[in-house]
Amino acid sequence: MSLPHAADAPAGTITGIRPAGTRALLVELGSLADVVALHTQLKSHPLPGQVDALAAAATVLVRFASRRDAVAGLPLLRALDFTHADADEPRTVIIETVYDGADLAEVARLTGLSEEAVVNAHTGTPWTGGFGGFAPGFTYLTGGDPALNVPRRSSPRTAVPPGAVALAGDYSAVYPRESPGGWQLIGRTAASMWDLSRPNPALISPGDLVQFTPIREFLPTTSSPSSPADSMEVGAGVGADTDGSEATDEGIRDVISPASPSEERGGSEGSGFPLRACEEEGGAAALRDGDVSDPTQGDHCHLEIGNPGLQSLIQDLGRPGYADLGVSAAGAADPRAARQANRLVGNPADAAVVENLLGSLELTAHGDAVLALTGAELPADVIDPAGVRSRPAPHAAPFALLDGETLVLGTPVRGVRAYLAVRGGLDVDPVLGSRSTDSMSGIGPAPLAAGTRLPVAVAGSLHVGDPEAPVLAAAGVPGTLGNGIEPGLLRITAGPRQDWFSNGAAAALAGQTWLTTSESNRIGVRLALDPQDTAASPLTRARGGELPSEGVVAGSLQVPPSGLPVLFLADHPVTGGYPVIAVVIPEDLPVAAQLPPGDPVRFIFVDPDTLAPLTAEQAAGLFPEGTE
């Protein structure tokens, strides 16, 4: 599915198309101008079945709803004329900046300019919004003064403050929220780069002109900036001090880390309106202390969290279509289990449910409710209002939780994520069209905590379902979870960057057993070698250098310099800077989301159309060493 590369391709030329899993195509282009033009064309005139189009430094990732749509989209992309794409009139965004960044002196040293000349160079030429980045509101800006081309810091910071104005390579950017980062910090702004109350939450969109304006200091203000007029937008307000601390991790690119739910969301801004429905009059039931009357059958009931366990989140089927804003689709990590839970209680498939990690969830019904528990297999009990165990709660079957009764989940015996649906669905406010919590972007409802009250919507016309078989099938066949002894078996398709690896990489990836690690979360699963396998070895690259950031899909197996793959899950970053050697097929992602730490897993290369396993020779043939 590749086209030859062209070093000096004419404008409007696609230099390559690579499959990125079974439902996405990675389109390679000769210039950033072509990237912007193709992205503009695809956003204004989507291809049949197109779900999303994500621009990056030299590529556009096009995601489709199905394999059939992706296959049909290939010839359409090859024939597409995007040289006259209908671009909107560019806006001008003015960013008022205090130039006192921690790295301003270092940038002056690297460029041979004075600090004043660095500021003049940064403000003397308008920048252009190129493409979205690793976080909502982070936009790579291009077209600045070439004298400002500086490398990333050799030691990234663990925390870059929101509003930091930075340089790296040919790019400039403003950090929208506190996050790790290795860019050179030259100043700070109070402009709100990401604000969910705006029609377009991102202050800077691809194609916008950005003019940095130097100021001495920000004036204190208690009100938000005035509304933008015409095509001019101005960011102003109170700035944040830069942080000069250093770190030895990979900063932006090291997105998988062992983090508690609070750590994953700590320091985020623009995180939506968590559980606002529980705090407002009208709409969902008002659930402030003292405002809740005793509910009866048919009233708006609610569920009260007594103990959330290690992590309990509100999830639905996610918010696809916002990747170019830096927002992943998120949604239930195991959508198959979430769908089953909703089906069992008679909800639409996209109703909001509770996703619980490793059990220990306790919640009490205020009003009679119908629930269903799916996903990870675990013991569950119903406790009566007197605190006495009343009965076991079934798995994969609807059951009643009566007024005053409490549901208590035990520790999973298989899988790690359980899903709890209530008839009617959880009635919390959507953010960007979804009620899901996105731990990477900091968008959506806050993690559930003791005392959280979850309103339940009025049930629809669908009937409560009959008991079903558990979604976690027996181990031993492709696409199933292991049992601790037999490994889980995940099916994969090669690429899009298999040419970065030697032709022995296929055998190294699929020919050995990998272990999941505790450094895993909803963003992704880190894999490690099996210490008992003396022949196990990390994956090795066939080429050096860095890969320009490009779009990635859920299921991507990204390979950092360590050679130990990271398997991206629902909350993965929308772009990545390490080569993706293969992608787990969408049908097996629910299994990947249920992998417990320390579990063995093996990968099986399959044909992307039939999903039939490939022989070792066929898989090796997909890895032509040195191919460009």
Image: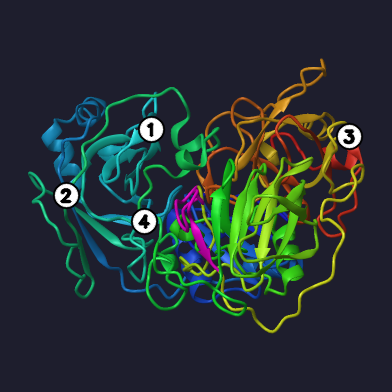
- For marks 4 and 1, the one nearer the N-term is 1
Report the Cα–Cα distance between label 4 and label 2.
16 Å
- Dominant SS of magenta comes to loop
First reached walking from the N terminus: tag 4 or tag 2: 2
For mark 2, what is the residue? Answer: 238
**In the image, is 584 to the left or to the right of 429?**
right
Name the residue at 67% across, 63% down: 421
Q: Crowding at label 2, few (<14), some or many (≥20) Cα neighbours within 10 Å?
A: some
**In this rendering, which labeled residue sits more in front, label 4 or label 1?**
4
- Upstream in sequence: badge 2 or badge 3: 2
Q: Badges 2 and 3: C-beta atoms under 8 Å apart?
A: no
Q: Is residue 113 above or below residue 52?
A: above
Is label 1 or label 3 in front?
Answer: 3
Highlighted magenta segment, given as a residue range? 440-455
Q: Which residue is mark 3?
A: 486
- Along the line of sight, the residue nearer the viewer: 230 or 269: 269
* Cα separation between marks 4 and 1: 23 Å
